[in-house]
Amino acid sequence: MRATWGQRLKDNGICLALLLLFPLAVYLPPWIQGEVPQEAGALLSMSPWSAHTPEEAATSTPLSSWQAGTVWPGYQFLNSNRESLGALQWNPAVGLGEPFIANPYNRVFSPFSVWFYLFGFVDALFLSILSKSLAAGWISYYVARRYGFTAWFGLIVALIFQWSGPLVIWQLEPLSDSLVWLPLLLLATDRLILGHFRSWPGVALVVAAMLLSGGLHMLAGSLVCMALYMLLRRLRDHKRAHIGGAIPGYALGVAAGFGLAAIQLLPYLELLREGNAIDHTYPWIFDSSLLLGLFGPSYYHRIGDGDNPLIHVVYIGVVPLLFVGFWGALRRLVERPLRHRIESLLFASVLVGAVPVVLQGLLPGINALRFLHPVHYLAGLSFPLALMVAAVVETWLHLNAEQCKRALLRMAIQLPVFWGGLLVVFVTFGWSALKTDSFPWDAFWCFTLTSLTLLVLFGATILYPRARILVAGTITLLVLTTAWGTLPWIPRAPQADIFPQTDVIRTLQESDARVGGTPRMATWPLHGNQIPALYAPSTVMLNRTEAYLAQVNAHPLLQRRAGIGTLLLQKEDIRGAYAPVRHDLNIVDIFDSGLILFRDQGAAPRIRIAHEVESATTATQALDASPLPVVPGVLLPPVSGAIQDTIQVVDVPENNHLELEIETNFPGVLIVSEAWYPGWQARVDDNVVPILPVDGVFRGVELGAGTHRVAFVYQSASLRWGALISLLCIGLFLTGAYMARRRPRRDH
């Protein structure tokens, strides 16, 4: 009997409330207790913060190192400069400065970053993670309902997707921000396949959302996966799959999506033109030990003793894993359109994810493809499996006597083989631990009891065919097994352990200067404590900064040209690269961690006027020990007499604005020791003047003798053009959405 409107409203309300209640139950207690979702071990093991290391230090993983180096400082910079878009355009704390908005990994335009504009850092972080989990649950629930599942079956789909590894373990990653939108991309693609060409705005909206969420690699994998999905649907259901109209609609939707996100995409393309993306993908090896991940991350880490990021996409949950066996027995009885949809998406995800696995030896040598990672292609695997579980449960409840008999026969043959094979894998890879206390008996019993419970549930519904028994039992098992397999691996750390105030940090903050040293500092995210550092983790290295650092590594005193008077070194540095210049350095402080703070009295000021320069002979002229800056195309007259320069900073309202009052008695070049980058403009006495790349990397303007007012302003042309294109594409999108709403409704 068809449910009434009131009953549907009640069921939907309960399911949506549960999808909110579960994330609150997980994320609210740590927030109340003053904990944040971050492993502190990667940070506290570094010298500047090692004095804060607790007695039981947290373990360090590549994921936590990446988050401590880039994700957390990015969120903190966004939060501390949230009052002005101009302040977010330029980040002066990383290297010699770099664009901030231009980098999509900073997620300035992500819907889940809006909280950082409204609240303090810790509160915003909690709300960002909560809203992301809630959006994943509600979006997947909506898509499941659109595919014809009733409310409680839709809840099964939503729970599996909401608590998948990438959305829980990687809750702070750009991948998780973009993965949330994947079910909507599938829904829009399906509409196109069914002949609704006017559904292209749905594709455009999802593509734009994924781009603005910083998931460039996730988007690339999803687009390729959806293209292969369309092909597989055509091969399996040629009568209903209208590829002729789907491909143009898909292409239009993707192009419009890129246009909607032009405000992010154009600045990023400019950034890539001026720099090189740094490969921060985590080390991984696709080997047989990853099969341990089928039973949970805890089992893999305890027995495999590894840290392969693929484990969090290979792990699909114990319940979905066991339901694969049921699918083999019941797939023929599932409605054909739904079966084709699930299997086509599943095969497309696996096939696309296999490409970087098979070609992992070749891809690093191909610049455009070196960032391909199976994580970005397999992360969405949980959604087709979620649809599969819901389809199995619903199909089982609607079998007649003859269908039930045939299904039981196939289950009697297939389930022992499939589940027995899983147990063999479990014991085989845990055999070495059987003689020790490390064998995860809890995982073994969880797997065994879950299997027996599912058999009881399926058997009970033969004698007593009530949907609520099987649905409620399946949901309960999902919650319990997810709590066992995933929640223990959600990172946690006290707020005080994230960029704590140690003696080293306090001293560097008091010095109020950019910190230099050796390349070892490239792993030290000092900018997380709002300390500018010459070497700093980043996702894109500017070409000019990279060339300068390469020369600094060979000749450390070249750091003086960057106005770096504070050097943070370790004892081995003094005996190594800095041994020849030891006599030029004065010890300021020695810390318990082994770090030594030096003051280099010979360092140039951050803002200075050079009255003698060396004119560049080549575009990339190498620097030497000469104190003269290299300035292309500038010839200054000889200085005769005493030099009298006065530089006063009038106003620094934002990171992208510097205003100075200059008084000098000789012509010269005003040098600001920050990176030259397109978009920086200079005015001298209200006249626009060109900015010269001093030493190939710094900003400089030529001045005559006298009094001047100089202003440097960063106004990205690519950001303005991107905003204009996005605005125009919004009009195109709204027009397309209006036309789609006016189309005659068609059953699908």
Image: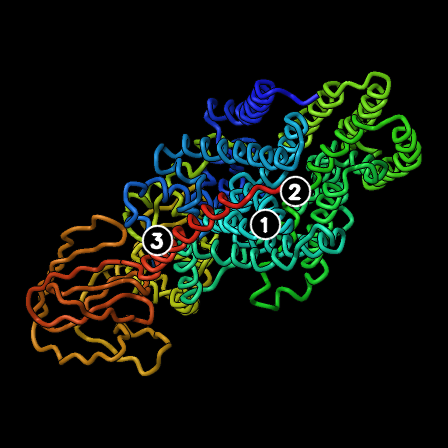
Counting residues from the start of the chain, the first of labels 2 and 1 encountered is 1
Q: Quadrant of the C terminus?
A: top right
- Evaluate whether residue 489 shows in this view: no
Q: Tell me whether the residue at label 3 lies in contact with that at label 2, contact meaning CB atoms closer than 8 angstroms.
A: no
Mark-to-mark CA distance, 2 and 1: 10 Å
Side (left or right) of 665 relative to 217: left
Amino acid of disc 1 = His
Determine which of the numbered discs, if any, sits on residue 515 in the image.
3
Amino acid of disc 3 = Val
Q: Secondary structure at mark 1?
A: loop
Label 3 neighbourhood size at 10 Å, few (<14), some (14-19), many (20+)?
Answer: many
Q: Which residue is mark 1?
A: 196
Name the residue: 45% across, 49% down.
212
Label 1 neighbourhood size at 10 Å, few (<14), some (14-19), many (20+)?
Answer: many
Q: Secondary structure at mark 3?
A: strand
Label 2 neighbourhood size at 10 Å, few (<14), some (14-19), many (20+)?
Answer: few
Quadrant housing residue 579: bottom left
- Residue 694 lies, in percent from the top left, at 28, 70
Outermost residue toward the front in this view: 744
- Residue 362 lies, in percent from the top left, at 67, 66
Determine which of the numbered discs, if any, sits on residue 275 in the image.
none
Counting residues from the start of the chain, the first of labels 3 and 1 encountered is 1
Q: Is residue 4 above or below residue 174?
A: above
Side (left or right) of 5 relative to 542: right
Amino acid of disc 2 = His
Mark-to-mark CA distance, 3 and 2: 62 Å
Q: Tell me whether the residue at label 2 lies in contact with that at label 1, contact meaning CB atoms closer than 8 angstroms.
A: yes
Q: Is residue 617 above or below residue 142?
A: below
Q: Nearer the viewer, residue 17 or 378?
A: 17
Q: Which residue is mark 2?
A: 748
